């Protein structure tokens, strides 16, 4: 099918999708989980083909080791994929919820009702688990979806998609073309211009991918590019406990977007703290870079070249700050508004930090690594957003919904209200 | 001040704004209302200058009569401006509300807290009341704002802005440059490229203005361009009552975005209904256009040239449809997803219409003209949005907010959870 026809057909399916009951949607998800389980060997075989192809890319340095690892499926990842789908079944249906209700006048009832966004395009790299995760979330939230995976995972993606699609085809209530997979790189450019049909784009991949998409479309984009997260160690911090947070925030998974890139240290504890951090990070093979002031204390570490830099590795920037104001000004200027945490025993400073730091996730006395949909209890996540509109932070099912206003009347006309024959009651019911 | 410096300074003010108490914000609004009341004659004088200038534009056909009328202030409009500000004082503070709260684990509390979006740019034409209305809403929601009005209202806008600004300057807690007015047409282009600083753009004006802005910026845009609203007259409709809805939806304020442009009529009642509508609309000087089938019944009316057309005047398109499916397919294809209403006594058809019509506002048995923030009981509105993300339909204070996640910990680390030393509780508190 031509791309435009596919997109139009997917858009067409959105109208029918929103009328599906929770039972039908959950039945679809349960069929998908069952069939993936049944046909997992076919998926492993497809994955082997992709790994073979990607090994060449890896040898030619065209993809990174971490991308190669993310591509590889094993029994554990397969179990996660299957249980991930079953987890979505357990989540509350986000559609057709009455979010607010007002009696505007007698027999004139306004309901604000949650509904799907419509047609969502997801552009992702590697990670074949994205396809089942995002498809499940879209099915549950009654959105149609167009998935575009990278060349490196093409066989795996095709196989998982085929299983999803066959499962949906077996359920007669499900409209055709509600879940779609496209392959060609050329298609991305075309997708970005289809603002007439596509309501939202979710990129899951490198900074470059996200930035390219944001710069080249008028369609709303949900996601984040950089993950430049900060820890601020206040002078009142419990130093031993703060050190553990530093280690967890950096070393627990250094390439994650929510791992820390810069640690800001209050000048009044800088000497003691930096010396202890130095030993701890040396022990854990974490490379340190500092500004002038830090290097006066730790002379043999590197120099920070760019506070905007996301290392994505066991490497960190260190900076001494005068006070809490200095700290949040640095974070608002150089951070990516993703996740930032203060370590402090001073309640006033905690309050200031959490108010003035303009990030999706602001923490006190805990690790930046907590910023994640599963850890937040959302059950599954679409991704993490640093947008200032629609959805911010880890985005679960709710971020795939919007609302419509339904007004149920009894032949009232506006003219009666503007001419003061009648007046509104505006009685809030919910 | 140079535009970029002004924008940077406005952005700077956003961090302080979010910490202001409700009392301070309401005090600011009450000062503004008081000072506008006190200095209303200065505003009238400025408005006279604008009217003089605009009369020339009107004579040269460079602006429309309706634009000229919207520009003109009188005592009634002035009272509306002042009471509009006082109404915003009465609204609940939308900031710092706890939207959700979860105990992730002992002493690990996640709060989803409402907060301002940040820096908002509003680009509007004529209507000097926009400046006080939007400023009030931004102050209440702790957003900084940059206002760009049209040349035609420059003196009035300057005077109202001066009063707002002086009122805010008298309140020491208020950060500088939180409300700003810019003048030059050239500035619009520059504003659109400042996605690093500006978080949201709200255009209030013609379709052309909104479409130009949407096509030329990466900043999220809140609003609507077209207002192509529909009525569908079902075969079960009470015909006499349906006729009244038709008249109200078209004639009550023909240039409003929520007035009806196309009336779809079920074929089984077409003959009776169209003949009655014809008499009623003739009486009220409403021009009618129909498709082939309609013209077989009403031979002397015009022919519909374009179902996408927004008349914005006492003119309407008429079409006969087979059934409810035909009706919502036409609406989803040709409508602008703004406001559409079904007139019917058939509950099943009402349910179908409200589910399948993909519009911000879907009605049964009432006039499309109800789609408005004041009528919905929001107290004030920023505008009406046909977006599928963030805010849809009439947008009040809530549409000017987003949220951040605040996580309050006690030195927990993620590694304890991924290694199963600890497990999450995910106890929903709110």
Image (cartoon, coloured by chain):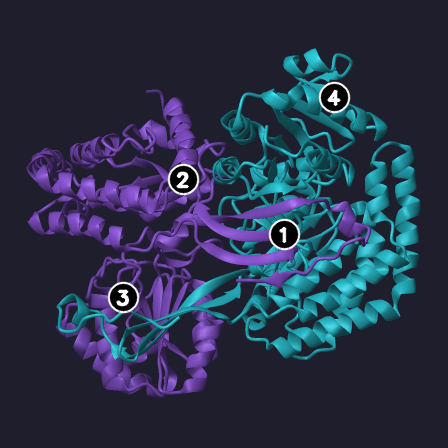
Chain colours: A purple, B cyan
The front one of B405 and A101 is: A101
Number of residue marks:
4
Label at residue A107:
1
Marks 4/3 same chain: no
User: At numbered mark 2, what does the secondary structure look like: helix, strand or loop?
Assistant: loop
* Residue drawn at 14 percent across, 70 percent down: A284
Q: Are marks 2 and 1 in contact (CB under 8 Å)?
A: no
Foreground: disc 4 or disc 2:
4
Q: How far apart are marks 4 and 1 (CA)?
A: 29 Å
User: At numbered mark 1, what does the secondary structure look like: helix, strand or loop?
Assistant: loop
Q: Distance between the residues labelled 2 and 3?
A: 38 Å
Chain holding disc 1: A
Q: Are marks 4 and 3 in contact (CB under 8 Å)?
A: no
Please identify the quarter of the rendering in which residue A164 is found. Answer: top left
* Residue drawn at 78 percent across, 36 percent down: B251
User: At numbered mark 3, what does the secondary structure look like: helix, strand or loop?
Assistant: helix
Q: Distance between the residues labelled 1 and 3?
A: 51 Å
Foreground: disc 2 or disc 1:
1
Residue holding disc 4: B275
Chain holding disc 2: A
Position of residue A425 measured from the top left corner of the image (x, y, whole percent): 68, 60
Residue holding disc 2: A19
Could one spot residue A300 in this view of the protein? Answer: no
């Amino acid at each position: 099918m031509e791309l435009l026809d596919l997109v139009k057909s997917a858009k067409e399916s959105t109208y029918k999708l929103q009328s599906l009951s929770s039972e039908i949607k959950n039945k679809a998800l349960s069929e998908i989980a069952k069939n993936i389980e049944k046909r997992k060997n076919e998926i492993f075989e497809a994955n082997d083909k992709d790994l073979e192809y990607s090994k060449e890319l890896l040898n030619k340095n065209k993809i990174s080791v971490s991308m190669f690892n993310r591509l590889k499926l094993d029994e554990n990842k397969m179990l996660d994929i299957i249980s991930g789908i079953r987890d979505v079944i357990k989540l509350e249906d986000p559609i057709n919820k009455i979010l607010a209700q007002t009696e505007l006048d007698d027999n004139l009832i306004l309901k604000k009702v949650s509904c799907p966004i419509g047609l969502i395009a997801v552009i992702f790299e590697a990670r074949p688990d994205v396809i089942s995760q995002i498809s499940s979330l879209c099915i549950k939230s009654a959105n149609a979806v167009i998935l575009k995976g990278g060349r490196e995972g093409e066989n795996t993606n095709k196989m998982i998609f085929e299983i999803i699609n066959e499962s949906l085809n077996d359920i007669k209530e499900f409209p055709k073309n509600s879940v779609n997979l496209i392959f060609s790189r050329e298609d991305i450019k075309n997708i970005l211009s289809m603002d007439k049909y596509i309501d939202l784009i979710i990129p899951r991949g490198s900074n470059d991918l996200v930035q390219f998409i944001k710069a080249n479309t008028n369609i709303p984009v949900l996601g984040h590019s950089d993950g430049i997260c900060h820890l601020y160690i206040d002078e009142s911090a419990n130093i031993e406990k703060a050190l553990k947070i530093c280690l967890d925030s950096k070393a627990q998974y250094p390439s994650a977007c929510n791992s820390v890139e810069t640690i800001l240290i209050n000048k009044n504890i800088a000497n003691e703290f930096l010396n202890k951090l130095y030993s701890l990070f040396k022990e854990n093979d974490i490379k340190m870079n500092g500004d002038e002031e830090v290097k006066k204390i730790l002379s043999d570490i590197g120099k920070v070249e760019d506070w905007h830099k996301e290392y994505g590795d066991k490497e960190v920037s260190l900076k001494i700050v005068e006070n809490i104001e200095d700290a949040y000004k640095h974070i608002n200027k150089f951070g990516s508004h993703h996740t930032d945490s203060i370590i402090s025993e001073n309640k006033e400073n905690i309050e200031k930090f959490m108010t003035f730091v303009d990030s999706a996730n602001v923490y006190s006395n805990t690790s930046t690594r907590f910023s994640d949909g599963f850890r937040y209890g959302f059950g599954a996540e679409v991704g993490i957003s640093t947008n200032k509109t629609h959805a911010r932070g880890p985005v679960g099912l709710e971020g795939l919904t919007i609302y419509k206003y339904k007004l149920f009347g009894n032949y009232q006309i506006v003219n009666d209200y503007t001419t003061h024959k009648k007046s509104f009651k505006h009685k809030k019911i919910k």
